Amino acid sequence: MFTLDQARSFIAVSEELHFGRAAERLNMTQPPLSRQIQKLERSVGVELLERDNRKVSLTAAGRAFLAEARKIVVAAERAPKTAQRIASGMSGQLRVGFTAASGFSILGSLLSEIAEGLPDVDVELQELVTGEQVAAIIDGDLDLGLARPAFDEDIFQSHLLFTEDLQLAVPVGHPLDRFNRSLRVADLKGAPLIMHSPTKASYFYDLVVRNVPVEHGNVVHTVSQIVTMVALVAAGRGVAFVPESARMLGIAGVSYLRLADIEPDAVELYAIWSREIRNPALVRLLEIIQMKGQ
Amino acid sequence: MFTLDQARSFIAVSEELHFGRAAERLNMTQPPLSRQIQKLERSVGVELLERDNRKVSLTAAGRAFLAEARKIVVAAERAPKTAQRIASGMSGQLRVGFTAASGFSILGSLLSEIAEGLPDVDVELQELVTGEQVAAIIDGDLDLGLARPAFDEDIFQSHLLFTEDLQLAVPVGHPLDRFNRSLRVADLKGAPLIMHSPTKASYFYDLVVRNVPVEHGNVVHTVSQIVTMVALVAAGRGVAFVPESARMLGIAGVSYLRLADIEPDAVELYAIWSREIRNPALVRLLEIIQMKGQ
DNA sequence: CGTCATTACGGAATGCGTAATGATA
DNA sequence: TATCATTACGCATTCCGTAATGACG
């Protein structure tokens, strides 16, 4: 098999059609160049150049080989550059997981920041619940997650991206929607409640239970997705605790009410990633949005 | 710059994810393989493999470089093969010139023979008069010509491909078309004649003059292309001497008449090519249609 | 005889294989 | 301690540059 140096030598000779000038261009003397071309021809098994002892010309096979050799050399010169770009995080791929709810709040601006700061990085998005994101990051199938706490500090690094109020979603015109004073938890007494799944949506479940004295007899549905919840509220099945950004779902017939005695900014969204960062593009992203080391 | 051997080594290690097995596959021992990978990484300027001292894995940059390396190695393996195919004449390009008239006789079957015998050879066709073909072959712009004699024997080799009668084209219903006995040259006396250009169509001009006592006073047009000639005959402008294959032009309103005292097979078409053959595909073609050495 | 490409030859560099070392579970 | 990858070292090969040769106008 021939070498890349031989290919480069052949390209030079083919372009100069003169061993002396080609050698000069390659910063070498004629004899080794001549030998390299001979070796190349021997390894290809074909005469590529016609030496007239006065002038050099390409054979038909030589012309075809020249075109191939150019492609190979160009590819060989490009390969390290793309590797460097990826190693530096300037280009590459970033696999980002997000929960359905976060898709309506922070995801858009995060993608904008990536597009602006890392224009050559491709973002692959996957909608996953927090548990799936955690598993995917551990398996190396995901670089960054937008998820709800809490996370194993030994495995993950995280950064609080966004907080928002936990509000009460009620059907428009519901008695609670017409209160003339600010609403309190106690006012919900007896209202049919659409509740979060304690297993699949444990974060919201725990959050609600911590803030509200839930009467389990009032729970009419158990749901894992915020979107489903709001749809059920719109259908008049009951009321539900959802993050304020659920407004952005744009589902009609639902009012979002603040409760005075629920701690504000109770709903947290974190960016999480593995402590063992393998993707340089992620390093760059963390630098850009200054999440590093937090 | 890295070498193709390093690229191959890297591919093997990337696929095996184990230096020992990769070395075995490459028919070498681990240490030199390890060194080659190190050199590769140094020349690329990036860590391509992550050595865990227990297992080997690819970095993001390594994955990208692997894809590039595969392309390069595949191209490097293919390049000699294509060069060999072209050198052997099995593939490549054949530039064939033909006169307008020959396009209606032998060209089709010649192209069929090329397509059958040399399926990977591309044929580039150019319609050129004999003189242009001769010049193009000398300049190296044409490999084979289908032309009229005579040719410089020092420069060209030639092979008689096809002969046909020189016939008289007359408008349908013309008095000569209604002769009840076989036509002779003398019967043309006084008929308006469409004649070949003595410069641009000297072969036909000389052929006609040699066979027919042309009365120059009867020449109503001087034309260089057979097609033009037949069109003028169809338009009733006169009669003309054309090769029999002009029938294949399919121009309506023209009869083609044999003249008893014109030598049969007077019109010759030759394949011509340079004595200095540079295109291996031409050698193959000459072998196939057994024109070589004639 | 001048121009180029090719062979001849000596020294430097590169690369392999065996052996030794290091690092990790 | 077993498993891999890496460094150490000696030997063979490769490759460059200078010098000599050859071919052709």
Image: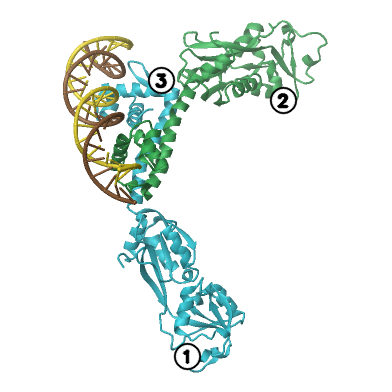
Chain colours: A green, B cyan, C yellow, D brown
Kindly tell me whether residue B251 is visible in this rendering.
Answer: no
Callout 1 amino acid: Arg
Q: Residue at x 37, y 47 (%)?
A: A57
Choose between A292 and A159: the one closer to the eye.
A292
In the shown orientation, is residue B44 left or right of residue A246? left
Q: Quadrant of the N terminus of chain B?
A: top left
Q: Residue at x 36, y 54 (%)?
A: B278
Residue A277 pos. (x, y %): 47, 16
Q: Residue at x 49, y 61 (%)?
A: B126
> For mark 2, what is the residue?
A251
Chain under numbered label 3: B
**Other residues around mark 3 within 10 Å, as few (<14) / some (14–19) / many (≥20):** many
Number of numbered tags placed on the structure image? 3
- CA gap between label 3 and label 2 equals 50 Å
**Other residues around mark 1 within 10 Å, as few (<14) / some (14–19) / many (≥20):** few
Callout 3 amino acid: Glu
Callout 2 amino acid: Ile
Choose between D8 and A247: the one closer to the eye.
D8
Say which quarter of the image contains residue B28. Answer: top left
Q: Quadrant of the C terminus of chain B?
A: bottom left
Q: Nearer the viewer, mark 3 or mark 2?
A: 3
> For mark 1, what is the residue?
B184
B23, above or below B187, in the image: above
Whether discs 1 and 3 lie on one chain: the answer is yes
Q: Are marks 1 and 3 in contact (CB under 8 Å)?
A: no
- CA gap between label 1 and label 3 equals 91 Å
Kindly tell me whether residue B173 is visible in this rendering.
Answer: yes
Whether discs 3 and 2 lie on one chain: the answer is no
In the shown orientation, is residue A141 left or right of residue A196? left
B210, above or below A219, in the image: below
Q: Secondary structure at mark 3?
A: loop
Q: Are marks 3 and 2 in contact (CB under 8 Å)?
A: no
